Amino acid sequence: MVHGGRLFDARHAFPKAPEPWIDLSTGINPAPYPVGEVSEASWTRLPEENEIRALEAAAAHTFGARFESSVIAAPGTETLIHLLPRLFPARHVAILGFTYSEYKIAYETAGAVVDIVDTIEELLSSDDFDTIVVVNPNNPCGRLVDPKHLTALASKLARKGGRLVVDEAFMDLMEDAASFVHRLPNEGAVILRSFGKTFGLAGLRLGFALAGSHDGEKIRAALGSWPISGASIEIGLRAYGDTGWLTATMARLEEDCEELDAVIEKLGLKVIGGTPLYRLAEGDHAQDVFQRLAQSGILVRAFKDKPNWLRFGIPGGDPEVWGNLIDRVRRILPK
């Protein structure tokens, strides 16, 4: 499963589609955090170490981490995804699928054998792997793995020097109890958290790793003295301190999901999963729906290996966007 947001490719493939395109192919909050003014100093001088630590402390508080020192700021989680296989080499990796393809690419590039495993029960009963990757909640289906199962996996891997990697990129908008952060052990596990998806600021390139002291020190050293920009620090501190915005966003997204589910059902598809930032739909005619939507200037996610699935991102909060979406969908429905 590759990235969404490929509007250039969509315009090339569907040159007669109306503009502007409605891009529902990503899982990024379409109503971003209002950044406001950013100080000139954030662009003109290198960040101080204490400023980076302040952002990490704010993130730790938001995530519910037990120790501030376990949180390491990075220039986006994708950087971490490709860094981990080099810092902690693995021979045999299991990825709980069907999921985001970047982990498979990263570990295979580093020389590991990668297996896609379908169920958490298979992982719990197997001793074949030295690294296990679980995307939680999963992209694209929204599957959640019980933290107690993740604890058991991390403990088993730690005994043989392996690691559990838990990608919580979409966890900010889920119930707090679903996160593995509260159970993070001092060895055997690394958690990744995203900033850009929840706050709609993917271009800022900000993410975090959470790890025990030994692994955390290795990750921090590998990222160097200035892993993130001054603007990232300033905006991140502002956003993590604005709990009212996050609460309001969660309420709005709940309403948006209900409205989007109704639109999906009008297309003859069944909603089978998702998170507050995307919905997964299924239908025998999914590929036909994808084509008709694209011809109408609406881009959603299709999956080569799951031809009956389509993933719909949440439209922007602007009523005009919703109205445009509903109007275009109405035009392609069977008469």
Image (cartoon, rainbow, N blue to C red):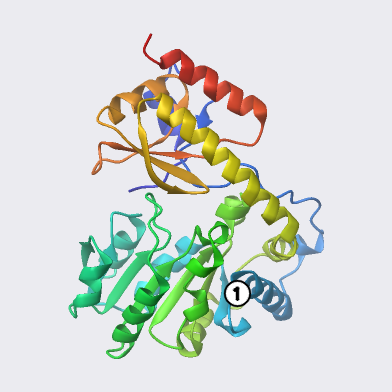
Q: Is residue 174 rendered to the left or right of residue 98?
A: right
Point out the image quarter for the C terminus.
top left
The foreground one among 220 and 26 is 26
Q: Give the residue type at disc 1.
A: Gly
Rendered residue at 36%/57% (across/down): 102
Examine the rendered structure and indicate whether residue 81 appears above or below residue 249: below
The residue at which mark 1 appears reads as 64
Q: Is residue 87 rendered to the left or right of residue 47?
A: left
Helix, strand or loop under label 1? loop
Q: Where residue 67 appears, x then y in whole percent? A: 60, 84
Rendered residue at 51%/86% (across/down): 217
The image quarter containing residue 195 is bottom right
Q: Where residue 77 appears, x then y in whole percent? A: 49, 63
Q: Is residue 18 rendered to the left or right of residue 10?
A: right
How packed mark 1 is, by other alpha carbons closer than 10 Å (few <14, some 14-19, many 20 or more), is some
Q: Where residue 106 appears, x then y in whole percent? A: 33, 64
